[in-house]
Image: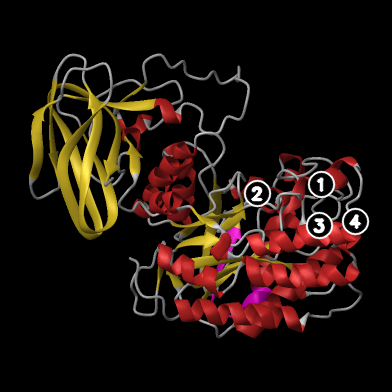
Amino acid sequence: MLHTVKGFLHTQDTIFVNEDGNEVLLRGMGVGNWLNPEGFLFGGASFGGAIGSFSRACAFDRGRTMDLYVAELAGRTYQKQFWDTWVDRYFGRADIAAMKRQGFNSVRLPVNARFLLDEEPGIHFNEAQFALLDRYLDWCEAEGLYVILDMHAACGGQSAISCDDGVDNQPHLFLDEESADRTVLLWKEIARRWADRWIIAGYDLLNEPIALPMFDGLIPELKAFYDRLVREIRSVDQKHILFLQGHRFAGRVDIFDHNYDPEYNNWAICVHLYESLPDLKVFGPILEKRDTLRVPVWMGETGGSSVGDSGTGNQWMAVTYEMCMEYHISYNIWVAKAVEGADAAATFTFRLPEDWQSILDYVERGAAKPSYERAIRIFDALLENIRVENCVERTDRVIHALRLPGSVVPASGYDADRPHSGQWPYALYCGYRREDHMHLLTEPGYVPMDEFIRTPGPLKYCDWPHILLRLDEGDCASYSVREAIEPVSVTLWCRTDRGGVVRVSDGSRVMYEGSVPVSDAFLPLAVGAVSAPERATVTAACISGSVDLKEIRFGA
Protein backbone atom coordinates (compact mmCIF):
# COMPACT_ATOMS: atom_id res chain seq x y z
CA MET A 1 0.00 0.00 0.00
CA LEU A 2 3.06 2.27 0.11
CA HIS A 3 4.09 1.95 -3.53
CA THR A 4 6.69 4.00 -5.38
CA VAL A 5 5.55 7.56 -5.98
CA LYS A 6 5.12 7.80 -9.73
CA GLY A 7 2.23 8.72 -11.99
CA PHE A 8 -1.12 10.38 -11.35
CA LEU A 9 -3.14 9.29 -8.36
CA HIS A 10 -6.88 8.94 -8.71
CA THR A 11 -9.78 7.59 -6.71
CA GLN A 12 -11.17 4.11 -7.20
CA ASP A 13 -14.26 3.51 -5.13
CA THR A 14 -13.12 4.27 -1.53
CA ILE A 15 -9.34 4.16 -2.03
CA PHE A 16 -6.57 6.03 -3.84
CA VAL A 17 -4.74 4.14 -6.57
CA ASN A 18 -1.78 4.85 -8.82
CA GLU A 19 -1.65 4.37 -12.57
CA ASP A 20 -0.88 0.66 -12.07
CA GLY A 21 -4.10 0.25 -10.10
CA ASN A 22 -2.26 -0.34 -6.80
CA GLU A 23 -3.66 1.22 -3.64
CA VAL A 24 -1.64 4.11 -2.24
CA LEU A 25 -2.10 5.31 1.33
CA LEU A 26 -0.76 8.83 1.74
CA ARG A 27 1.18 9.43 4.93
CA GLY A 28 2.50 12.95 4.93
CA MET A 29 3.35 16.22 6.62
CA GLY A 30 1.87 19.69 6.25
CA VAL A 31 4.17 22.69 5.84
CA GLY A 32 2.33 25.12 8.05
CA ASN A 33 3.92 28.47 8.92
CA TRP A 34 5.81 28.63 5.60
CA LEU A 35 3.85 30.59 2.99
CA ASN A 36 1.11 31.27 5.53
CA PRO A 37 2.77 32.05 8.90
CA GLU A 38 0.74 31.52 12.07
CA GLY A 39 1.57 33.12 15.40
CA PHE A 40 1.50 30.00 17.56
CA LEU A 41 3.90 28.20 15.19
CA PHE A 42 6.07 31.26 14.62
CA GLY A 43 6.61 32.41 18.20
CA GLY A 44 3.93 35.10 18.30
CA ALA A 45 0.31 35.21 19.45
CA SER A 46 -1.66 32.11 20.36
CA PHE A 47 -3.80 30.20 17.86
CA GLY A 48 -6.93 31.93 16.64
CA GLY A 49 -6.23 35.45 17.82
CA ALA A 50 -9.52 37.13 18.71
CA ILE A 51 -11.37 33.94 17.83
CA GLY A 52 -15.11 34.25 17.43
CA SER A 53 -15.27 38.04 17.37
CA PHE A 54 -15.18 40.73 14.73
CA SER A 55 -11.81 42.39 15.04
CA ARG A 56 -9.48 44.08 12.61
CA ALA A 57 -6.42 41.82 12.42
CA CYS A 58 -3.85 43.48 14.66
CA ALA A 59 -2.19 40.86 16.82
CA PHE A 60 1.07 39.12 15.92
CA ASP A 61 -0.99 36.08 14.98
CA ARG A 62 -0.97 35.79 11.16
CA GLY A 63 1.20 36.59 8.18
CA ARG A 64 -0.70 39.75 7.32
CA THR A 65 0.04 41.37 10.68
CA MET A 66 3.51 39.87 11.06
CA ASP A 67 4.38 41.53 7.77
CA LEU A 68 3.40 44.92 9.15
CA TYR A 69 5.41 44.48 12.33
CA VAL A 70 8.54 43.31 10.53
CA ALA A 71 8.41 46.50 8.44
CA GLU A 72 7.69 48.61 11.49
CA LEU A 73 10.55 47.14 13.48
CA ALA A 74 13.17 46.62 10.79
CA GLY A 75 12.17 48.83 7.86
CA ARG A 76 10.54 48.24 4.48
CA THR A 77 13.78 47.32 2.75
CA TYR A 78 14.50 44.59 5.27
CA GLN A 79 10.88 43.42 5.25
CA LYS A 80 11.05 41.90 1.76
CA GLN A 81 14.51 40.45 2.41
CA PHE A 82 13.23 38.80 5.60
CA TRP A 83 10.29 37.03 3.96
CA ASP A 84 12.29 35.92 0.93
CA THR A 85 14.86 34.39 3.25
CA TRP A 86 12.15 32.94 5.47
CA VAL A 87 10.59 31.06 2.54
CA ASP A 88 13.96 29.70 1.39
CA ARG A 89 15.15 28.57 4.80
CA TYR A 90 11.95 27.47 6.50
CA PHE A 91 11.19 24.82 3.92
CA GLY A 92 13.79 23.91 1.35
CA ARG A 93 15.28 20.98 -0.51
CA ALA A 94 16.87 19.65 2.71
CA ASP A 95 13.48 19.66 4.47
CA ILE A 96 11.91 17.72 1.61
CA ALA A 97 14.75 15.18 1.71
CA ALA A 98 14.26 14.86 5.49
CA MET A 99 10.56 14.04 5.04
CA LYS A 100 11.45 11.30 2.60
CA ARG A 101 14.12 9.92 4.92
CA GLN A 102 11.68 9.89 7.83
CA GLY A 103 9.34 7.65 5.85
CA PHE A 104 6.62 10.00 4.60
CA ASN A 105 5.39 9.80 1.01
CA SER A 106 3.48 13.07 0.64
CA VAL A 107 3.44 16.72 1.66
CA ARG A 108 0.61 19.22 2.03
CA LEU A 109 1.70 22.65 0.83
CA PRO A 110 -0.52 25.41 2.28
CA VAL A 111 -0.69 28.45 0.01
CA ASN A 112 -1.95 31.97 0.57
CA ALA A 113 -4.09 33.51 -2.16
CA ARG A 114 -2.63 36.98 -1.72
CA PHE A 115 0.82 35.73 -2.70
CA LEU A 116 -0.42 34.24 -5.97
CA LEU A 117 -3.06 36.85 -6.84
CA ASP A 118 -2.21 40.45 -6.03
CA GLU A 119 -4.67 42.23 -3.75
CA GLU A 120 -5.25 44.93 -6.34
CA PRO A 121 -8.07 45.82 -8.76
CA GLY A 122 -8.10 43.44 -11.70
CA ILE A 123 -6.56 40.00 -11.96
CA HIS A 124 -2.77 40.06 -11.66
CA PHE A 125 -1.08 36.73 -10.95
CA ASN A 126 2.29 36.83 -9.22
CA GLU A 127 4.60 35.01 -11.61
CA ALA A 128 7.48 34.92 -9.14
CA GLN A 129 5.36 33.03 -6.62
CA PHE A 130 4.14 30.56 -9.23
CA ALA A 131 7.75 30.00 -10.27
CA LEU A 132 8.69 29.40 -6.63
CA LEU A 133 6.01 26.73 -6.27
CA ASP A 134 7.12 25.17 -9.55
CA ARG A 135 10.59 24.78 -8.08
CA TYR A 136 9.21 23.04 -5.00
CA LEU A 137 7.13 20.72 -7.16
CA ASP A 138 10.34 19.77 -8.97
CA TRP A 139 12.09 19.03 -5.67
CA CYS A 140 9.19 16.94 -4.38
CA GLU A 141 9.14 15.01 -7.65
CA ALA A 142 12.88 14.37 -7.39
CA GLU A 143 12.52 13.11 -3.81
CA GLY A 144 9.37 11.11 -4.51
CA LEU A 145 6.80 12.97 -2.39
CA TYR A 146 3.27 13.49 -3.67
CA VAL A 147 2.05 17.08 -3.21
CA ILE A 148 -1.38 18.23 -2.10
CA LEU A 149 -1.87 21.94 -2.78
CA ASP A 150 -3.91 23.44 0.06
CA MET A 151 -5.73 26.78 -0.22
CA HIS A 152 -5.12 27.65 3.42
CA ALA A 153 -5.93 31.33 3.01
CA ALA A 154 -8.47 32.04 0.26
CA CYS A 155 -9.37 35.49 -1.03
CA GLY A 156 -11.18 37.34 1.73
CA GLY A 157 -10.76 34.48 4.20
CA GLN A 158 -12.93 31.39 4.59
CA SER A 159 -12.44 30.32 8.22
CA ALA A 160 -12.94 33.56 10.19
CA ILE A 161 -9.91 32.80 12.35
CA SER A 162 -6.26 33.78 12.10
CA CYS A 163 -5.13 30.78 10.04
CA ASP A 164 -6.96 32.13 6.97
CA ASP A 165 -4.91 35.37 7.09
CA GLY A 166 -8.06 37.46 6.86
CA VAL A 167 -8.34 41.12 7.79
CA ASP A 168 -11.12 40.98 10.36
CA ASN A 169 -12.01 37.41 11.41
CA GLN A 170 -14.99 37.24 9.08
CA PRO A 171 -15.55 34.65 6.30
CA HIS A 172 -15.60 37.13 3.43
CA LEU A 173 -15.29 34.36 0.86
CA PHE A 174 -18.97 33.63 1.56
CA LEU A 175 -20.01 37.24 2.20
CA ASP A 176 -18.44 39.10 -0.72
CA GLU A 177 -19.10 38.16 -4.33
CA GLU A 178 -15.71 39.51 -5.40
CA SER A 179 -13.82 37.31 -2.91
CA ALA A 180 -15.60 34.22 -4.19
CA ASP A 181 -15.01 35.16 -7.85
CA ARG A 182 -11.31 35.79 -7.29
CA THR A 183 -10.84 32.49 -5.46
CA VAL A 184 -12.49 30.61 -8.31
CA LEU A 185 -10.28 32.39 -10.85
CA LEU A 186 -7.17 31.61 -8.82
CA TRP A 187 -7.97 27.92 -8.50
CA LYS A 188 -8.75 27.73 -12.20
CA GLU A 189 -5.38 29.30 -12.98
CA ILE A 190 -3.58 26.87 -10.66
CA ALA A 191 -5.34 23.94 -12.32
CA ARG A 192 -4.62 25.27 -15.82
CA ARG A 193 -0.91 25.67 -15.14
CA TRP A 194 -0.39 22.32 -13.43
CA ALA A 195 -3.00 20.08 -15.01
CA ASP A 196 -0.27 17.78 -16.33
CA ARG A 197 1.92 17.61 -13.21
CA TRP A 198 1.51 14.10 -11.88
CA ILE A 199 3.49 14.83 -8.70
CA ILE A 200 0.45 16.81 -7.51
CA ALA A 201 -1.87 14.24 -5.94
CA GLY A 202 -4.67 16.76 -5.79
CA TYR A 203 -6.09 20.10 -4.72
CA ASP A 204 -7.31 20.77 -1.16
CA LEU A 205 -9.87 23.37 -2.16
CA LEU A 206 -10.46 25.24 1.13
CA ASN A 207 -8.89 24.86 4.54
CA GLU A 208 -11.41 24.67 7.42
CA PRO A 209 -14.19 26.73 5.84
CA ILE A 210 -16.78 28.17 8.23
CA ALA A 211 -14.80 26.99 11.23
CA LEU A 212 -17.00 28.48 13.95
CA PRO A 213 -20.61 27.52 14.80
CA MET A 214 -21.65 31.18 14.70
CA PHE A 215 -21.29 31.03 10.89
CA ASP A 216 -23.23 27.80 10.30
CA GLY A 217 -25.86 29.83 8.49
CA LEU A 218 -23.41 30.08 5.60
CA ILE A 219 -23.22 26.32 5.03
CA PRO A 220 -25.53 26.50 1.94
CA GLU A 221 -23.13 29.05 0.45
CA LEU A 222 -20.21 26.70 1.12
CA LYS A 223 -21.91 23.81 -0.68
CA ALA A 224 -22.87 25.99 -3.63
CA PHE A 225 -19.34 27.37 -3.81
CA TYR A 226 -17.88 23.86 -3.95
CA ASP A 227 -20.26 22.90 -6.76
CA ARG A 228 -19.25 25.99 -8.72
CA LEU A 229 -15.53 25.61 -8.00
CA VAL A 230 -15.43 21.95 -9.03
CA ARG A 231 -17.11 22.76 -12.36
CA GLU A 232 -14.60 25.53 -13.09
CA ILE A 233 -11.56 23.43 -12.19
CA ARG A 234 -12.82 20.49 -14.24
CA SER A 235 -13.10 22.73 -17.29
CA VAL A 236 -9.28 22.85 -17.40
CA ASP A 237 -8.10 19.87 -15.31
CA GLN A 238 -9.77 16.47 -15.29
CA LYS A 239 -6.87 14.52 -13.77
CA HIS A 240 -6.27 15.68 -10.22
CA ILE A 241 -8.13 14.56 -7.11
CA LEU A 242 -10.23 17.26 -5.47
CA PHE A 243 -10.24 17.25 -1.64
CA LEU A 244 -13.27 18.86 0.03
CA GLN A 245 -13.52 19.83 3.69
CA GLY A 246 -16.62 20.30 5.80
CA HIS A 247 -17.38 22.99 8.38
CA ARG A 248 -16.48 23.21 12.10
CA PHE A 249 -12.72 23.02 11.56
CA ALA A 250 -13.24 20.27 8.95
CA GLY A 251 -14.59 18.07 11.71
CA ARG A 252 -18.13 17.68 10.36
CA VAL A 253 -19.23 15.69 7.33
CA ASP A 254 -22.82 16.95 7.05
CA ILE A 255 -22.23 18.80 3.77
CA PHE A 256 -21.32 15.59 1.94
CA ASP A 257 -24.83 14.76 0.78
CA HIS A 258 -24.19 14.46 -2.96
CA ASN A 259 -21.49 13.71 -5.50
CA TYR A 260 -19.50 16.93 -5.86
CA ASP A 261 -17.67 15.67 -8.97
CA PRO A 262 -20.40 13.78 -10.85
CA GLU A 263 -18.72 13.79 -14.26
CA TYR A 264 -15.28 12.52 -13.22
CA ASN A 265 -15.90 11.14 -9.71
CA ASN A 266 -12.33 11.88 -8.69
CA TRP A 267 -12.81 13.58 -5.35
CA ALA A 268 -12.36 12.75 -1.67
CA ILE A 269 -13.72 13.77 1.70
CA CYS A 270 -11.13 15.62 3.77
CA VAL A 271 -11.41 15.72 7.56
CA HIS A 272 -9.25 17.18 10.33
CA LEU A 273 -8.83 15.40 13.66
CA TYR A 274 -7.10 16.37 16.88
CA GLU A 275 -7.17 14.67 20.28
CA SER A 276 -10.61 13.02 20.00
CA LEU A 277 -10.92 9.49 21.36
CA PRO A 278 -9.84 7.13 18.56
CA ASP A 279 -12.92 4.94 18.22
CA LEU A 280 -16.09 4.65 16.14
CA LYS A 281 -17.63 7.71 17.78
CA VAL A 282 -15.15 9.68 15.67
CA PHE A 283 -14.59 7.35 12.74
CA GLY A 284 -18.17 6.10 12.41
CA PRO A 285 -19.77 9.17 10.78
CA ILE A 286 -16.76 9.54 8.47
CA LEU A 287 -16.87 5.91 7.37
CA GLU A 288 -20.64 6.07 6.87
CA LYS A 289 -20.28 9.01 4.46
CA ARG A 290 -17.39 7.29 2.70
CA ASP A 291 -19.33 4.09 2.17
CA THR A 292 -22.53 5.89 1.14
CA LEU A 293 -20.86 8.13 -1.45
CA ARG A 294 -18.15 5.59 -2.41
CA VAL A 295 -15.30 8.08 -2.16
CA PRO A 296 -12.00 7.91 -0.22
CA VAL A 297 -11.21 9.82 2.96
CA TRP A 298 -8.06 11.85 3.56
CA MET A 299 -7.33 13.09 7.08
CA GLY A 300 -5.68 16.22 5.77
CA GLU A 301 -4.69 17.70 9.11
CA THR A 302 -4.03 15.99 12.41
CA GLY A 303 -1.46 15.73 15.18
CA GLY A 304 -0.91 14.65 18.75
CA SER A 305 -0.74 17.53 21.20
CA SER A 306 2.68 18.44 22.57
CA VAL A 307 1.25 20.33 25.55
CA GLY A 308 1.64 18.63 28.92
CA ASP A 309 2.45 14.94 28.59
CA SER A 310 4.06 14.67 25.14
CA GLY A 311 4.14 10.90 25.53
CA THR A 312 0.36 10.88 25.45
CA GLY A 313 0.35 12.81 22.18
CA ASN A 314 2.75 10.29 20.67
CA GLN A 315 0.66 7.34 21.81
CA TRP A 316 -2.51 8.98 20.52
CA MET A 317 -0.87 9.27 17.10
CA ALA A 318 0.28 5.64 17.23
CA VAL A 319 -3.29 4.46 17.85
CA THR A 320 -5.22 6.96 15.70
CA TYR A 321 -3.07 6.66 12.60
CA GLU A 322 -2.97 2.88 12.83
CA MET A 323 -6.77 3.01 12.78
CA CYS A 324 -6.53 5.24 9.72
CA MET A 325 -4.39 2.63 8.00
CA GLU A 326 -6.82 -0.14 9.00
CA TYR A 327 -9.75 1.84 7.59
CA HIS A 328 -7.77 2.79 4.42
CA ILE A 329 -7.74 6.46 5.39
CA SER A 330 -4.71 8.50 4.32
CA TYR A 331 -3.43 11.10 6.77
CA ASN A 332 -1.28 14.22 6.94
CA ILE A 333 0.30 15.54 10.14
CA TRP A 334 0.33 19.20 11.12
CA VAL A 335 3.12 20.36 11.04
CA ALA A 336 6.57 19.65 9.63
CA LYS A 337 8.30 22.43 11.58
CA ALA A 338 7.32 24.79 14.41
CA VAL A 339 8.77 26.86 17.21
CA GLU A 340 9.90 24.89 20.23
CA GLY A 341 6.99 24.48 22.67
CA ALA A 342 4.22 25.04 20.11
CA ASP A 343 1.10 22.93 20.54
CA ALA A 344 1.76 20.95 17.37
CA ALA A 345 3.19 17.57 16.44
CA ALA A 346 6.14 19.12 14.62
CA THR A 347 8.90 16.73 13.61
CA PHE A 348 11.43 19.59 13.60
CA THR A 349 11.47 22.41 16.16
CA PHE A 350 13.46 25.64 16.20
CA ARG A 351 14.48 27.90 19.07
CA LEU A 352 13.65 31.57 19.35
CA PRO A 353 16.49 34.11 19.60
CA GLU A 354 17.51 35.07 23.12
CA ASP A 355 16.18 38.62 22.75
CA TRP A 356 12.89 37.60 21.10
CA GLN A 357 10.82 38.71 24.10
CA SER A 358 11.64 42.33 23.35
CA ILE A 359 9.86 41.94 20.00
CA LEU A 360 6.79 40.44 21.68
CA ASP A 361 6.78 43.06 24.45
CA TYR A 362 6.64 45.82 21.86
CA VAL A 363 4.00 44.11 19.73
CA GLU A 364 1.74 42.91 22.54
CA ARG A 365 2.20 45.50 25.32
CA GLY A 366 3.52 48.61 23.66
CA ALA A 367 6.84 48.39 25.48
CA ALA A 368 9.94 50.24 24.30
CA LYS A 369 10.56 49.72 20.61
CA PRO A 370 13.82 47.91 19.84
CA SER A 371 16.13 49.91 17.60
CA TYR A 372 16.21 49.03 13.90
CA GLU A 373 19.67 47.52 14.34
CA ARG A 374 18.60 45.42 17.31
CA ALA A 375 15.39 44.22 15.63
CA ILE A 376 17.28 43.23 12.47
CA ARG A 377 19.80 41.33 14.58
CA ILE A 378 16.95 39.42 16.28
CA PHE A 379 15.16 38.63 13.03
CA ASP A 380 18.45 37.51 11.44
CA ALA A 381 18.99 35.14 14.37
CA LEU A 382 15.52 33.70 13.84
CA LEU A 383 16.28 33.12 10.15
CA GLU A 384 19.39 31.23 11.15
CA ASN A 385 17.55 29.10 13.72
CA ILE A 386 14.91 27.86 11.26
CA ARG A 387 17.42 26.12 8.99
CA VAL A 388 16.67 22.41 9.21
CA GLU A 389 20.26 21.66 10.22
CA ASN A 390 19.84 23.98 13.23
CA CYS A 391 16.53 22.45 14.33
CA VAL A 392 15.88 19.59 16.73
CA GLU A 393 14.46 16.53 15.00
CA ARG A 394 11.69 14.88 17.03
CA THR A 395 12.23 11.28 15.99
CA ASP A 396 9.88 10.12 18.75
CA ARG A 397 6.98 11.78 16.92
CA VAL A 398 7.96 10.25 13.58
CA ILE A 399 8.23 6.79 15.14
CA HIS A 400 4.76 6.96 16.68
CA ALA A 401 3.10 8.70 13.73
CA LEU A 402 4.24 5.89 11.42
CA ARG A 403 4.03 3.11 14.09
CA LEU A 404 7.67 2.21 13.61
CA PRO A 405 9.92 0.13 15.89
CA GLY A 406 10.29 2.10 19.10
CA SER A 407 6.55 2.81 19.39
CA VAL A 408 4.79 2.60 22.74
CA VAL A 409 1.16 1.60 22.22
CA PRO A 410 -1.43 1.92 25.02
CA ALA A 411 -3.20 -1.37 25.62
CA SER A 412 -6.59 0.27 25.09
CA GLY A 413 -5.48 1.11 21.54
CA TYR A 414 -5.63 -2.44 20.21
CA ASP A 415 -5.90 -3.00 16.44
CA ALA A 416 -9.42 -2.67 15.07
CA ASP A 417 -8.85 -5.02 12.12
CA ARG A 418 -6.88 -7.80 13.86
CA PRO A 419 -8.13 -10.40 16.33
CA HIS A 420 -9.73 -8.89 19.42
CA SER A 421 -12.58 -10.24 21.49
CA GLY A 422 -14.20 -9.46 24.80
CA GLN A 423 -17.32 -10.32 26.71
CA TRP A 424 -17.65 -7.28 28.96
CA PRO A 425 -21.29 -6.11 28.93
CA TYR A 426 -20.58 -2.64 30.32
CA ALA A 427 -18.79 0.53 29.22
CA LEU A 428 -16.63 3.24 30.70
CA TYR A 429 -18.18 6.59 31.60
CA CYS A 430 -16.62 8.13 28.48
CA GLY A 431 -17.94 5.29 26.30
CA TYR A 432 -14.58 4.64 24.68
CA ARG A 433 -14.75 1.67 22.27
CA ARG A 434 -17.93 0.36 23.84
CA GLU A 435 -18.82 -1.38 20.58
CA ASP A 436 -16.09 -4.02 21.13
CA HIS A 437 -17.18 -5.26 24.59
CA MET A 438 -13.57 -5.23 25.74
CA HIS A 439 -13.03 -4.90 29.49
CA LEU A 440 -11.69 -1.36 29.73
CA LEU A 441 -11.15 0.28 33.11
CA THR A 442 -9.37 3.31 34.50
CA GLU A 443 -6.16 2.98 36.46
CA PRO A 444 -6.44 2.70 40.26
CA GLY A 445 -6.89 6.02 42.02
CA TYR A 446 -7.87 7.92 38.90
CA VAL A 447 -11.18 9.82 39.06
CA PRO A 448 -12.79 10.07 35.59
CA MET A 449 -13.62 13.56 34.36
CA ASP A 450 -17.20 14.72 34.60
CA GLU A 451 -18.80 15.89 31.38
CA PHE A 452 -20.10 19.08 32.94
CA ILE A 453 -17.65 19.84 35.75
CA ARG A 454 -14.31 20.39 34.10
CA THR A 455 -11.03 20.47 35.99
CA PRO A 456 -8.75 23.51 35.54
CA GLY A 457 -6.26 23.54 32.70
CA PRO A 458 -6.26 22.23 29.14
CA LEU A 459 -8.29 19.07 28.57
CA LYS A 460 -6.45 17.47 25.72
CA TYR A 461 -7.23 13.79 25.98
CA CYS A 462 -9.64 13.62 28.95
CA ASP A 463 -9.71 10.09 30.40
CA TRP A 464 -7.94 8.36 27.53
CA PRO A 465 -4.37 8.29 28.95
CA HIS A 466 -5.68 6.60 32.10
CA ILE A 467 -7.57 3.74 30.46
CA LEU A 468 -6.30 0.17 30.90
CA LEU A 469 -7.33 -3.09 29.24
CA ARG A 470 -8.20 -6.13 31.31
CA LEU A 471 -8.08 -9.45 29.50
CA ASP A 472 -10.39 -11.91 31.19
CA GLU A 473 -10.25 -15.61 30.42
CA GLY A 474 -11.00 -16.09 26.71
CA ASP A 475 -10.32 -12.45 25.76
CA CYS A 476 -7.62 -11.34 23.33
CA ALA A 477 -6.23 -8.16 21.75
CA SER A 478 -3.78 -7.51 18.92
CA TYR A 479 -1.12 -4.87 18.33
CA SER A 480 0.99 -4.11 15.27
CA VAL A 481 4.29 -2.51 14.39
CA ARG A 482 5.18 -1.43 10.86
CA GLU A 483 8.38 -1.68 8.85
CA ALA A 484 10.08 -4.05 11.30
CA ILE A 485 12.80 -5.07 8.86
CA GLU A 486 14.94 -6.51 11.66
CA PRO A 487 13.49 -8.42 14.64
CA VAL A 488 11.83 -6.04 17.10
CA SER A 489 11.46 -6.97 20.77
CA VAL A 490 7.95 -6.97 22.23
CA THR A 491 7.34 -6.12 25.88
CA LEU A 492 3.98 -6.12 27.65
CA TRP A 493 3.62 -3.89 30.67
CA CYS A 494 1.10 -5.84 32.70
CA ARG A 495 0.00 -7.03 36.11
CA THR A 496 -2.59 -9.19 37.83
CA ASP A 497 -4.01 -9.02 41.32
CA ARG A 498 -5.44 -12.54 41.41
CA GLY A 499 -3.40 -14.58 39.00
CA GLY A 500 -3.52 -14.94 35.25
CA VAL A 501 -1.91 -16.80 32.36
CA VAL A 502 -1.25 -15.07 29.06
CA ARG A 503 -0.38 -16.47 25.64
CA VAL A 504 1.25 -14.24 23.03
CA SER A 505 1.46 -15.25 19.37
CA ASP A 506 2.44 -13.62 16.09
CA GLY A 507 -0.04 -15.47 13.87
CA SER A 508 2.28 -18.35 13.04
CA ARG A 509 3.80 -19.29 16.39
CA VAL A 510 3.35 -18.97 20.11
CA MET A 511 5.96 -16.49 21.29
CA TYR A 512 5.25 -16.77 25.00
CA GLU A 513 2.91 -18.55 27.38
CA GLY A 514 3.07 -18.28 31.12
CA SER A 515 1.84 -16.74 34.34
CA VAL A 516 1.88 -13.03 35.02
CA PRO A 517 3.34 -12.21 38.46
CA VAL A 518 0.84 -10.97 41.02
CA SER A 519 1.69 -7.32 41.67
CA ASP A 520 0.17 -3.93 42.42
CA ALA A 521 2.53 -2.34 39.92
CA PHE A 522 2.80 -2.81 36.17
CA LEU A 523 5.91 -4.83 35.33
CA PRO A 524 7.63 -5.51 31.99
CA LEU A 525 7.07 -8.93 30.46
CA ALA A 526 9.38 -9.69 27.53
CA VAL A 527 7.55 -12.02 25.16
CA GLY A 528 9.95 -12.29 22.20
CA ALA A 529 10.50 -10.49 18.91
CA VAL A 530 8.64 -9.99 15.62
CA SER A 531 9.60 -8.86 12.14
CA ALA A 532 7.80 -8.13 8.88
CA PRO A 533 8.64 -5.63 6.11
CA GLU A 534 5.18 -4.04 6.14
CA ARG A 535 3.26 -4.96 9.29
CA ALA A 536 3.94 -7.40 12.15
CA THR A 537 1.19 -8.24 14.63
CA VAL A 538 1.17 -9.84 18.07
CA THR A 539 -1.97 -11.15 19.77
CA ALA A 540 -2.18 -11.41 23.54
CA ALA A 541 -4.80 -13.83 24.88
CA CYS A 542 -5.75 -14.58 28.48
CA ILE A 543 -5.79 -18.36 29.05
CA SER A 544 -6.98 -18.23 32.66
CA GLY A 545 -7.69 -15.68 35.37
CA SER A 546 -7.30 -12.08 34.27
CA VAL A 547 -4.45 -9.80 33.26
CA ASP A 548 -4.35 -6.00 33.17
CA LEU A 549 -2.38 -4.46 30.28
CA LYS A 550 -1.10 -0.90 30.33
CA GLU A 551 1.03 -0.66 27.19
CA ILE A 552 2.95 -2.62 24.58
CA ARG A 553 6.46 -1.55 23.67
CA PHE A 554 7.97 -2.45 20.31
CA GLY A 555 11.71 -2.19 20.68
CA ALA A 556 13.72 -0.21 23.21
Which sits in the foreground, 232 or 75? 75
Mark 1 secondary-structure assignment: helix
Q: Amino acid at mark 1?
A: Ser
**What's the mark number on residue 371?**
4
Q: Which residue is mark 2?
A: 247
Mark 4 secondary-structure assignment: loop
State the separation of the CA atoms marked 3 and 4. Answer: 17 Å
Mark 3 secondary-structure assignment: helix
Which is nearer the N-term, disc 4 or disc 1? 1
Measuring 90% from the left and 73% from the top, which residue is drawn there?
Answer: 120
Q: Which residues are magenta?
A: 231-244
Which is nearer the N-term, disc 4 or disc 2? 2
Quadrant of the rendering where the C terminus is positioned? top left
Q: Which residue is mark 1?
A: 358
Which sits in the foreground, 448 or 136? 136
Q: Amino acid at mark 2?
A: His
Residue 102 image-quadrant placement? bottom left
> Is residue 243 highlighted in magenta?
yes
State the separation of the CA atoms marked 2 and 3. Answer: 27 Å
Residue 361 lies left or right of residue 482; in this view the side is: right
Discs 2/3, front: 3
Measuring 32% from the left and 48% from the top, which residue is drawn there?
Answer: 406
Which is nearer the N-term, disc 3 or disc 4? 3
**What's the mark number on residue 66?**
3
